[in-house]
Image (cartoon, rainbow, N blue to C red):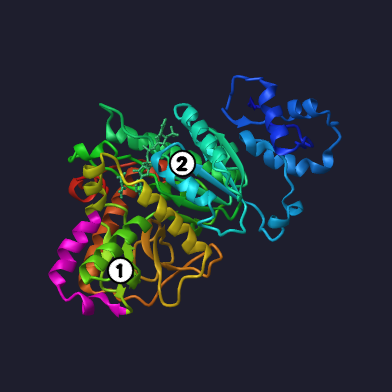
Amino acid sequence: MEISSARAPAGSRLLATPLGAHAACRRSGQLLRPRRHTVRCSVDATRQAQGIPSAVAAEAEAAEARKRAFGVFCTTYDLKADEKTKSWKKMVNIAVSGAAGMISNHLLFQIAAGEVFGLDQPIALRLLGSERSFQALEGVAMELEDSLYPLLREVSIGIDPYEVFEDADWALLIGAKPRGPGMERAALLDINGQIFAEQGKALNAVASKNVKVIVVGNPCNTKYGYFLVYQVCPASACSALICIKNAPNIPAKNFHALTRLDENRAKCQLALKAGVFYDRVSNMTIWGNHSTTQVPDFLNAKIDGRPVKEVIKDTKWLEEEFTLTVQKRGGVLIEKWGRSSAASTAVSIVDAMKSLVTPTPEGDWFSSGVYTTGNPYGIAEDIVFSMPCRSKGDGDYELATDVEIDDFLWERIKKTEAELLAEKKCVAHLTGDGIAFCDLVNEDTMLPGEM
Ligand SMILES: NC(=O)C1=CN([C@@H]2O[C@H](COP(=O)(O)OP(=O)(O)OC[C@H]3O[C@@H](n4cnc5c(N)ncnc54)[C@H](OP(=O)(O)O)[C@@H]3O)[C@@H](O)[C@H]2O)C=CC1
Ligand SMILES: O=C([O-])CC(=O)C(=O)O
């Protein structure tokens, strides 16, 4: 294996039995100081080691695809030659930022196992880290190697989003810098905001033009933030808006801010109260921000196909305890765990992706933070706001129109909308909207992880 900043020459190719090529990669032993820290096989070394002539241009395409592969994944294989893989679909490229973090440590293994796309979908994982996390990222890639997932055909790691996002069909933006001791939140917001702006630009430049993007990272990480009650911090909807504005060639509709964890938490609480298993709860909308102003909608949600209010007649509980429990679930979890939800967040990312690649069950919907322009509810345009969505399973979605909004719900929606509009002003310098001005109301802008 070689670490190199140079691209594999066009027309180069790895031809080998799996272990042979791997050994050749490792034998090359040319550890060049990486400019971009992309780990890849040494194509030339492999070729030399195996006496393969340079004129193997026929396989250039395959070599191009494998040029950044890590470890065992730099071996060449022929999907079609393998009986088992003949019915497999075309490879899907999934880029993941924050790949050395806690959430990714759960998520990558679920994706590699086929839990999102099914057992006939080969997968390439492109993992984005940083100088700081690079060694950890190698550790993640090694664990993926050792897991021997049949569907996982490629893994590559790097720290340059322009390399890692190349041809990405999906981009899962999980990484966000945690705040260090003594660091001002505004400074961190700027640093993380810049990262989401850069990643938006990189996606715009090199990803598939129809890439689907799920933004998970909060631009102001709250891992340590729950100690600091008086400070404020925009959430992942804001990161998604920054990405959208920096990726003008990608349809804004393709960007999602994760609120599926909030939806799952709300379903669980309703099931608990009604004394039913959580698969009986449907039509659960989270409106608005992934913050403590989010609105878990008990007006439209159903239990066993009946309106929640017919099953749970305790309106006070629904309006107060249920709502607060969902809004603050992340914080309670941090108190117990000493860190923010990672496993359940990973599961909810799998759920969010599955909701886009499988048809939504008849009559049901799912929540996602999506771009509001053209929304039928009267929510402010040009923000990212969680709303009820339906998909035909083609990666796209439509907003559900068969929803009821009463005065109570509308009042809550306006509150979370006001927060998102205020957050938008805080990142104006990153969205092309002029000079940033931050006047967030502390009490209303905390993430679920902040108490
Ligand atoms: N929308 C939602 O529902 C939720 C969102 N979140 C948010 O998701 C984001 C990621 O959360 P999570 O994965 O728990 O965060 P982690 O703190 O585990 O990871 C965050 C970043 O820290 C760096 N890092 C992590 N582990 C290591 C390591 N061992 N060595 C070196 N660097 C490391 C990585 O950054 P890098 O590679 O860039 O150096 C990574 O992206 C956060 O912003 C969090 O607030 C969390 C829960 C729910
Ligand atoms: O603030 C965090 O990092 C945790 C978070 O978003 C949540 O649990 O919903």
The quarter of the image holding the N terminus is top right
The label on residue 277 is 1
Report the residue marked by disc 2: 197
Range drawn in magenta: 306-327
Residue lying at 63% horizontally and 26% vertically, measured from the top left: 5
The quarter of the image holding the C terminus is top left
- Res 416 seen here: yes
Q: Quadrant of residue 7?
A: top right
- Say if the magenta span includes residue 416: no
Ligand 1 image-quadrant field: top left
Q: Classify mark 1: residues with Cα within 10 Å, few (<14), some (14-19) or many (20+).
A: some
Q: In the image, what residue type sits under mark 1?
A: Phe
Instruction: Tell me where residue 355 appears, x and y as whole percent.
Output: 47, 63
Helix or strand or loop: what does disc 1 sit on?
loop
Residue lying at 30% horizontally and 75% vertically, measured from the top left: 302
Q: Is residue 367 above or below residue 5?
A: below
- Say if the magenta span includes residue 314: yes
C-alpha span from label 2 to label 1: 41 Å
